[in-house]
Image: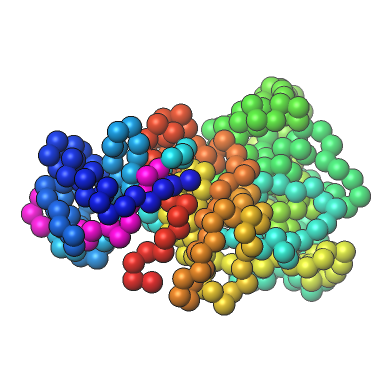
C-alpha cells in the first residue's frame, strides 16, 4: 500500500530532481510524456516537456506526475495551472505518495473505455453454466420482426429467418444438463460465437465489429494454457473438425450462446451445406447475436427463469483511471453501493471490445455527493489483460507492462474540484 510523504520530504525530493535535471513522467490524456522540473514553489511546479509532439496541454487539465527516487516510485495528482511554451505550470500536488507495490500503472480515464458494475447483493442465482461474458438482458430497442410475447411465434420466426443462412437450424437448451464436449465447453466458457471451419475470421471476410463476438484462435490458445484440464487439445480438435468440413459437404457450422446475464442458458445452432455458388455471409453473425439477445429477453418475459432470485442491478460508473489489474471509479452517493471487500462483476468496454471480469473492493471513500471505489481484479483472462496492455500502454507483453514505472492509487483521493 502507498505511503504519503511529508511536505518537507517532498520539497527535498523535488529539489534533488531539479538539481540533477532528472526526468519525470507525466500522464496526459492517456499518454506518457517525459519532462524535467525547472523550478517549484509552494503553489506551482514548472515542468519542461522533453517528449516530441506531446499532446496539447490546456488549463485545468488533469495530470499525474511520476518519478523514481532512491529506487522507489513516487506519484502525485494535480492539474495544469497554465500552459507555457515548451511545458506547463502545474498546481503543486496536494499529496505525493510513495509506491510500495503495484504490478501495473494506472492510466487516467482513457477515451473509448467504459466500466459497468453489477451489485452482487442482487446477483442472479440459476442452475445454468456461467461464462466469462456478462450481457445485461434488456427490452429490444429496435423491431427486427420478432414478437417476444409468445415463445412459439418467436421460435417459428427464428426458423424462417435462419433459412436465409442455413439448411438446418435449432436451439439447444441447458435446462437440466451441463455442457457436453469441447465445442459446448468453449462457447459456454467464452460466451462467444464459434464457427467451423475455424478460425472463420481468417478464412472469410468478417468485419471487425462482428469478429469481436467470435471465439478466436488467440482465445483458444489462452484457454489451453490457463485451464488445461478443461481445454487441453481444443485447438487440435477444432482444426481436425474444420478439415473434415468438405468431406461432410458442409460450408460451415455455427454455435451462438444465449446469454442471460452471466449464464449461458443454451445456444443457437446453424449448419449450411456446400452448394453451387454457396459462400459465407457475415450477416449471419449479426443475425444470431441479435436473435440470442431477443430470445433471452423473451424467456425472461415468459417466466422461464421463475427460479431466479432477483435481477442484477447494473450501474454505469464514471471511470477515473484503469490499469491491467485494477480500476478506480465513482458513482453518485445516493445509488445502491458496494461494501468493503465485496466481490462484484465488472463489464469493461474497450472501444468495440467487451469483456467481463471479477473484482474485489479494496478501497471505499465517500466524498461530497460521490462514492469512490478502488477494485482489484480477482479473475481476469490473459486475453483481456493483453488487450488492456495494448490499449493502455501500447505494448503486447504483460511482462513488459509490469516493468513500466508504476503508480499506486489505492489512496483513492478524489480528483480536485469534486
Q: Is residue 87 magenta?
A: yes
Judge left or right: residue 123 versus residue 399.
Answer: right
Mark yes or no: residue 337 visible. Answer: yes
Judge left or right: residue 206 versus residue 273.
Answer: left
- Please state the horizontal and vertical placement of residue 230, each as a whole percent of the image: 76, 30
Magenta range: 84-99
Q: Nearer the viewer, residue 338 or 272?
A: 338
Mark yes or no: residue 291 visible. Answer: no
Please name the residue shown 87% across and 64% down the image. Answer: 307
Judge left or right: residue 10 versus residue 50.
Answer: right
Q: Nearer the viewer, residue 89 or 300?
A: 89
- Please state the horizontal and vertical placement of residue 372, each as a whole percent of the image: 50, 64
Image vertical order of residue 147 relative to residue 115, above or below:
below
- Please state the horizontal and vertical placement of residue 95, each as a whole percent of the image: 33, 56
Image vertical order of residue 267 relative to residue 245, above or below:
below
Please name the residue shown 71% across and 47% down the image. Answer: 131
- Please state the horizontal and vertical placement of residue 90, each as a whole percent of the image: 20, 58
Please name the residue shown 83% across and 70% down the image. Answer: 302
Q: Nearer the viewer, residue 118 or 260?
A: 118
Please name the residue shown 40% across and 31% down the image. Answer: 403
Amino acid at each position: 500500500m502507498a505511503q504519503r510523504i511529508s511536505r518537507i520530504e517532498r520539497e527535498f525530493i523535488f529539489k534533488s530532481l531539479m538539481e540533477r535535471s532528472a526526468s519525470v513522467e507525466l500522464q496526459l490524456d492517456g499518454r506518457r510524456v517525459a519532462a524535467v522540473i525547472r523550478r517549484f514553489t509552494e503553489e506551482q511546479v514548472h515542468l519542461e516537456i522533453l517528449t516530441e509532439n506531446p499532446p496539447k496541454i490546456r488549463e485545468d487539465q488533469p495530470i499525474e506526475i511520476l518519478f523514481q527516487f532512491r529506487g522507489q516510485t513516487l506519484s502525485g495528482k494535480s492539474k495544469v495551472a497554465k500552459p507555457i511554451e515548451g511545458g506547463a505550470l502545474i498546481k503543486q500536488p496536494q499529496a505525493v505518495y510513495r509506491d510500495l507495490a503495484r504490478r501495473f500503472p494506472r492510466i487516467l480515464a482513457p477515451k473509448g473505455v467504459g466500466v459497468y458494475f453489477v451489485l452482487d447483493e442482487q446477483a442472479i442465482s440459476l442452475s445454468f453454466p456461467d461464462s466469462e461474458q456478462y450481457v445485461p438482458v434488456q427490452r429490444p430497442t429496435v423491431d427486427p420482426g420478432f414478437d417476444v410475447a409468445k415463445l412459439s411465434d418467436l421460435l417459428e420466426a427464428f426458423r424462417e429467418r435462419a433459412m436465409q443462412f442455413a439448411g438446418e437450424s435449432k436451439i439447444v437448451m441447458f435446462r437440466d444438463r451441463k455442457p457436453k464436449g469441447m465445442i459446448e465447453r468453449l462457447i459456454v466458457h467464452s460466451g462467444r460465437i464459434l464457427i467451423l471451419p475455424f478460425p472463420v475470421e481468417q478464412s472469410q471476410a468478417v468485419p471487425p465489429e462482428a469478429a469481436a463476438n467470435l471465439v478466436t484462435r488467440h482465445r483458444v490458445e489462452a484457454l489451453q494454457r490457463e485451464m488445461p484440464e478443461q481445454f487441453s487439445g481444443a485447438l487440435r480438435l477444432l482444426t481436425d473438425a474444420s478439415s473434415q468440413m468438405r468431406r461432410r459437404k458442409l460450408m460451415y457450422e455455427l454455435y451462438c450462446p444465449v446469454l442471460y446475464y452471466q449464464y449461458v442458458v443454451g445456444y443457437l445452432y446453424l449448419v449450411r451445406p456446400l452448394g453451387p455458388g454457396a459462400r459465407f455471409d457475415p450477416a449471419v453473425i449479426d443475425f444470431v447475436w441479435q436473435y440470442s439477445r431477443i430470445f433471452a429477453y423473451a424467456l425472461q418475459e415468459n417466466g422461464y427463469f421463475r427460479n431466479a432470485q432477483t435481477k442484477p442491478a447494473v450501474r454505469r460508473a464514471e471511470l477515473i483511471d484503469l490499469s491491467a489489474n485494477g480500476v478506480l471509479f465513482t458513482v453518485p452517493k445516493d445509488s445502491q453501493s458496494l461494501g468493503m471487500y465485496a466481490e462484484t462483476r465488472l463489464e469493461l468496454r474497450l472501444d468495440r471490445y467487451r469483456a467481463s471480469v471479477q473484482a474485489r473492493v479494496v478501497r471505499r471513500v465517500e466524498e461530497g455527493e460521490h462514492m469512490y471505489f478502488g477494485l482489484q481484479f480477482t479473475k481476469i483472462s490473459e486475453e483481456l489483460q493483453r488487450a488492456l496492455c495494448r490499449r493502455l500502454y501500447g505494448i503486447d507483453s504483460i511482462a513488459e507492462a509490469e516493468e513500466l514505472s508504476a503508480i499506486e492509487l489505492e489512496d483513492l483521493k478524489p480528483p480536485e474540484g469534486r
